[in-house]
Amino acid sequence: MSRDDLRRRMRRRRRALAAATPEAGAEAARRLPDDALPPIRVFAAYLPTGGEFDPGPLAQRLLALGAEQVLPRVPQEGSMQFVLAPPDCALEPDAAGQPAPPPGAPERRPDLVIAPLLAFDRFGGRLGQGGGHYDQALAKLRRTGPVFVLGLAFAGQEVDRLDLEAHDQPLDAVLTEAGYRRLPQA
């Protein structure tokens, strides 16, 4: 099966899982062990679209611990940035068409990136939407220091093994409504 075919299939599956388990985000946040993550000062979350797993409850838990939240923004040129979005900030579509803070929002380097995905495997593989925005941003972050990448997904998005490409960035762990799991990098 091609990556595009797998993406189509997994988008349908993710929408069905989202409809069947609307409280999955809250359940996942409850299942994250207190000592699972490294120390976090800044974390990147995302605004869910298309049945993506809701990171809101996990973000609230991290905010309560004193971490600062940033959101992704894809500029007209260059790789995805992680920028501050004050609570009263008006969001607007970025170059990828996703709601994001406006241009000029201050960038911050996250210690933790909560990554959306279409599929994951037990080896740390992640299948994204296909634009490469997260892979490029994660590669850039990893060149400048450590960053912990947490995939957030429904348990039903796990597949046996993803056929990864050289540019694909691995997950360090995955959090689902069924629990938390550290992932070895293949």
Image (cartoon, grey):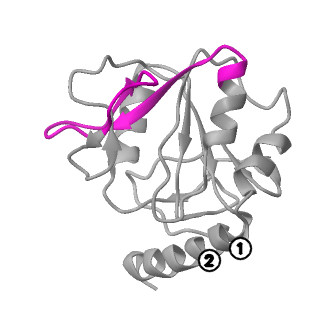
The residue positioned 54% from the left and 27% from the top of the image is: 147
The residue positioned 35% from the left and 62% from the top of the image is: 130
- List the residue tagged with mark 1: 20
> Is residue 159 among what the camera can see?
no
Whether 36 is among the magenta residues is no
Q: Position of residue 183 (x, y in %)?
A: 71, 48
Is residue 66 positioned above or below 29 on the image? above
Give the amino acid at mark 1: Ala
Q: Position of residue 63 (x, y in %)?
A: 65, 22
- List the residue tagged with mark 2: 16
Q: In the displayed orientation, state which residue is furthest to the bottom.
A: 1
The residue positioned 24% from the left and 43% from the top of the image is: 94
The part of the chain drawn in magenta is 63-91
Tag 2 secondary structure: helix
Task: Tell me if mark 1 has few (under 14), some (14-19) or many (20+) residues whose alpha carbon lies within 10 angstroms of its own.
Answer: few
| Residue 149 as seen in the image, left or right of residue 139 | right
